[in-house]
Image: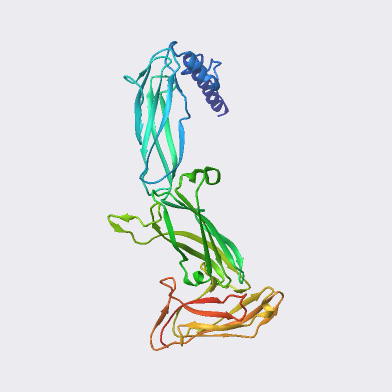
Amino acid sequence: MKKFWFWILISALLGFGTAWAINYQKFGHRVAWFGPFGTASDLKPADLESFLESRLPEGRPRVETLDPPEFDFGLMAPGSEGEHVFRVRNVGDDDLRLRLGASTCKCTFGDLEREVLAPGEETDIKLSWFVKSGSEEFGQSAEIITNDPKRVVIRFSITGQVIREIDIEPDTWSFGEVATGEPLEVKGTIYNFMDTPIEITEVKFSNDEITALSEFDVQPFQPTEENDGIRSIAKQGFRVVAKVKPGVRQGAVSQNLLFKFLRVDDEGQPVKIEDEEQGDQYFVAPVKGSVVGPLGMIVTSRLKGREGGGFLYDFGRIEKGDPLVAKAFVVLKGSERDNTQLSIGEVEPEGVVKAKLGEPKGQGSMKLYPLEIELVPGDETIERMGRTRDEFGSIWIESDNPKVSKMRVALKFALDPQ
């Protein structure tokens, strides 16, 4: 049995050796090549460009671009047209042939006969474009195909920004974070890129309560390149300051400044559109910030802060036997905590929502007011599930201190008759 396995091993070794010898005889002594690279070559990948250039014929055309192939035109208004000229030269020893390739804009050659440049000649390549509205950024390109073996395709491109007829800077005017009871201020700049001047006739916030607390200062100026950069091409500029007195409700503020304006002529008279005097027009500047203060609440799984300010308590749908009373804590903190008394203000819907504040309890630098909220069933189902932004019940926590703004607690619930 041992001899049997011995001869099996010998046979396997003989077969392996024979196969290797045959394979080496056919393939092992050959050099493998892939283009200029081979197992016997000293050429390195880094040397490929110079190697290929050495194989190019003498006396060939060579194209040179005399301007950067990318051009940033800055700002342009929708509906306007622009053009830019790129220049190329033949620095080779043979005729340079040019033709148009793929293009996203209108592209024309300059003084170019039969699309051929003799050695030493140069020509203009003009790109022209039309700016459409609907996008803040703009880009077009065109390709020129050549017979230069080193630069078969040259791609020229133009980029820039599309401005609105009336542009605002910055895009959003922010007053940051302001303590409740303190005034706030927002600033911004308006640029008019229309053909005619405008007159701003009214400024207001989209919220009437904030407008009533506000004073607006609008100062016209003439934009300059030194002060306004690429916006210096605007026909007019306005520097705007809105000062708001204390009294804005605590929480995040997201409003619009509304500017009513008229187009006027150089004498300041309203221009006419289609033989009729124009009506008032508006543009807006978004305003954001946050009014923070000593009044807040302790959040729970059911009680959360709202993005627009205040808090939301979610009862959900209340069925028969579910509890109708919820408890929470109103927090009064900071230096005004000992000079402030809180009370329950308006509730909605009246007769369905009841609220009661307990005696405050001191805890370090804050006071905690127990808040009890009760829902009272009626004869009909009452839904305040927030299907629209303000379709909630609500409780207002009032303050007798002008430095502590009142706070809203929104209530989300559906209450069946019980």
Tell me residue 198's x, y (percent): 42, 55
**In front here: 158 or 312?**
158
Image quarter in which the N terminus is found: top right
Residue visible at 43% across and 23% down?
Answer: 88
Tell me residue 302's x, y (percent): 53, 74
Q: Is residue 280 above or below residue 359?
A: above
Q: Is residue 85 above or below residue 133?
A: above
Residue found at the far right of this picture: 364
Give the quadrant of residue 61: top left
Q: Is residue 82 above or below residue 176?
A: above
Give the quadrant of residue 90: top left
Q: Is residue 158 above or below residue 313?
A: above
Numbered circles on residues, count: 0
**In front here: 312 or 228?**
228
Tell me residue 329's x, y (percent): 60, 78
Q: For this view, does 339 lie left or right of residue 90?
A: right
